């Protein structure tokens, strides 16, 4: 049994990691902002210890990390403080791991080990965090996820409740995607095998699908036709802002894809999910009956 502090344990990534760690019998400390929230209470009921704090509170974070063997952490983009706020969060995580001697498993973004300005703040911020990490004496593993499959669950953007799958990419453009289930699978592997994973940086993808393929898969899973609809770039800028619009333009122009087959063969202990396999794990009745998030 390993003692693990999970940052953002009520979020998508942290929640998946915390759940899998608990399933594997580990001692989980969940670092949460709202311990009374339903998701935090569910973690507590499953056996996690709740500690209240946020990524701007060095004392609370240091206290939560005291005595743990490993820390799963991530920095949170799109805050009111912008890129600087996220960089500060990431550096604090690194500092706490350095002081405690814990094995840090940091979830970043694909390609953030390369210091190349992208003008996309949530990518550039992680480049700066990783650069800081490389300068410190920290036992660390860095995971670099690609675009999340779970983004389609943002119904205000994907418009699934309108009976279509909307996305800014052209219908035939392939996109590497990952599910938080596979991020969790590799993160827990890293926690359980620190000697193998310390010092490694691994970009992660679960599957590569086009928008048209994703729509066909969702049609099959949902049992009704879900046509693909490309979202005009001007609409993306209006709804989601320039940063997200620029990110999708980079995806549209991208020709550099991960070697997914080799990645999965290298870590066969992870239960990798294709897009269809992931879609079959979703409680679509609950998702589609809930409020859309713009």
Image (cartoon, rainbow, N blue to C red):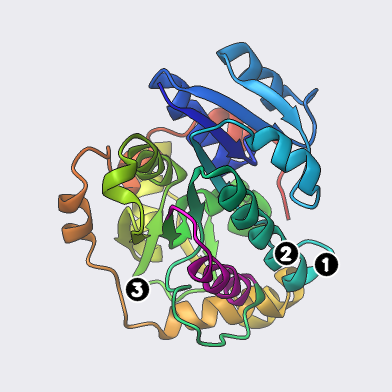
Q: Which residue is mark 2?
A: 88
Reading the image, the residue beneath label 3 is 172
Which of the two marks, 1 or 3, is nearer to us in this view? 1
Distance of label 2 from label 1 (alpha carbons): 10 Å
Residue at 37 percent across and 44 percent down: it is 182
Mark closest to the chain's N terminus, 1 or 3: 1
- Which circle, 2 or 1, is nearer the viewer? 2
Compared across the picture, whether 171 is left or right of 73 comes to: left
The reply to whether discs 2 and 3 touch (Cβ–Cβ < 8 Å) is no
Q: CA distance from mark 1 to mark 3?
A: 36 Å
Q: How many marks?
A: 3
Location of residue 200 (image quadrant): bottom left
Residue 122, how many percent across, how many down?
63, 70
Mark 3 burial class by Cα count in 10 Å: few <14, some 14-19, many 20+: few
Local secondary structure at mark 2:
helix
Nearest to viewer (mark 2 / mark 3): 2
What is the distance, in whole Å, between disc 2 and disc 3 at their CAs? Answer: 38 Å
Identify the element where label 3 is drawn.
loop
> Few, some or many C-alpha atoms within 10 Å of disc 1 (few <14, some 14-19, many ≥20)?
few
Asked if residue 125 is among those painted magenta in the image, a careful observer would answer yes
CB contact under 8 Å: marks 2 and 1? yes
């Amino acid at each position: 049994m390993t003692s693990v502090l999970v940052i953002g344990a009520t979020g998508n990534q942290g929640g998946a990691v915390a759940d899998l760690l608990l399933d594997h019998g580990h001692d989980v400390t969940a670092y949460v902002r709202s311990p009374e929230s339903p998701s935090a209470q569910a973690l507590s009921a499953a056996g996690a210890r709740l500690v209240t704090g946020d990524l701007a509170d060095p004392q609370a974070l240091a206290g939560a990390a005291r005595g743990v063997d490993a820390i799963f952490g991530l920095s949170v983009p799109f805050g009111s403080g912008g890129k600087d706020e996220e960089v500060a969060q990431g550096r604090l995580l690194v500092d706490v791991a350095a002081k405690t001697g814990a094995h840090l498993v940091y979830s970043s973004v694909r390609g953030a080990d390369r210091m190349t300005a992208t003008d996309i703040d949530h990518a550039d911020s992680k480049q700066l965090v990783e650069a800081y990490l490389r300068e410190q004496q920290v036992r660390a593993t860095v995971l670099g996820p690609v675009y999340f499959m779970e983004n389609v669950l943002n119904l205000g953007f994907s418009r699934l409740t309108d009976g279509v799958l909307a996305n800014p990419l052209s219908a035939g453009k392939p996109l590497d995607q990952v599910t938080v289930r596979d991020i969790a699978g590799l993160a827990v592997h890293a926690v359980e095998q620190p000697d193998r994973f310390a010092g490694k940086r691994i970009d992660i993808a679960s599957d590569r699908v086009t928008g048209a393929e994703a729509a066909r898969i969702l049609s099959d899973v949902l049992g009704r036709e879900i046509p693909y609809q490309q979202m005009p770039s001007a609409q993306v800028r209006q709804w989601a802002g320039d940063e997200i619009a620029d990110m999708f333009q980079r995806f549209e122009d991208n020709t550099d894809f991960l070697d997914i087959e080799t990645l999965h063969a290298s870590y066969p202990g992870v239960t990798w999910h294709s897009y269809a396999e992931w879609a079959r794990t979703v409680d679509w009745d609950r998702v589609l009956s809930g409020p859309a998030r713009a």
